[in-house]
Amino acid sequence: MSNNSLFLSNLRVIVAASICDGTIDPSEFKKIQVFIERESKEAATSIKESAELQLESAKKDPQGFCERVLQDLSNATMPLAEKIYLTNSAIETVRTDGLMLSEEIKFIKTLISKLGLTESLIETLHGKWWIIDISPTKLN
């Protein structure tokens, strides 16, 4: 997969993981913006424009966007490292707000399945990724 294709695939995954509950949390949106800025710094302007179009599409039809992303990924051929990269990005993005909503968990579990990965592999990398650690200092 080319760098531009991987960027757009990753962008679509993190947007879908963030919006699968109907809205993108402000902290998740900020993480997405940082990703776009970092990745498009040295790339063509068309990447940034494509990123903005993806975000607009996701906001217009969150559920449809998520379904299209998952369908496109189930048909994609990519190396294991890229599949893990996409999954890691999705997990990191939705954890940004300190919550792991049931819709986000369902989306990521479906993503793992569509990419042909096993949940045990992802657990090896992230532990129980669907649990957000709430330490006593965070409750104050």
Image (cartoon, rainbow, N blue to C red):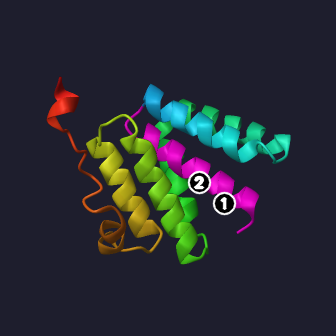
Q: How many residues crowd around disc 1 within 10 Å: few (fewer than 14), some, or many (20 or more)?
A: some
x and y percentages locating residue 80 in the rendered image: 53, 76
Q: Is there any visible trace of residue 74 in the rendered image?
A: no
Mark seen at residue 87 = none
Disc 2 marks which amino acid?
Asn
Residue that mark 2 sits on: 10
Of helix, strand and loop, which one carries label 1?
A: helix
Q: Residue at x 69, y 38 (%)?
A: 37
x and y percentages locating residue 136 in the rendered image: 14, 34
State yes or no: residue 8 in magenta. Answer: yes
Residue 56 image-quadrant placement: top right
Confirm or deny contact between disc 2 and disc 1 (CB under 8 A).
yes
Disc 1 marks which amino acid?
Leu
Query: In which quadrant is the C terminus drawn?
Result: top left
**Which secondary structure dominates the residues rendered in magenta?**
helix
Q: Residue furthest top?
A: 140
State yes or no: residue 12 in magenta. Answer: yes
Instruction: Give the magenta-colored segment's residue range.
Output: 1-22
Q: Residue at x 20, y 39 (%)?
A: 134
Q: Is there any visible trace of residue 98 in the rendered image?
A: yes
Of helix, strand and loop, which one carries label 2?
A: helix
Residue that mark 1 sits on: 6
x and y percentages locating residue 22 in the rendered image: 41, 33
Q: Residue at x 75, y 44 (%)?
A: 40
Q: Quick check: 38 above or below 4?
A: above
Residue 18 image-quadrant placement: top left
Q: How many residues crowd around disc 2 within 10 Å: few (fewer than 14), some, or many (20 or more)?
A: many
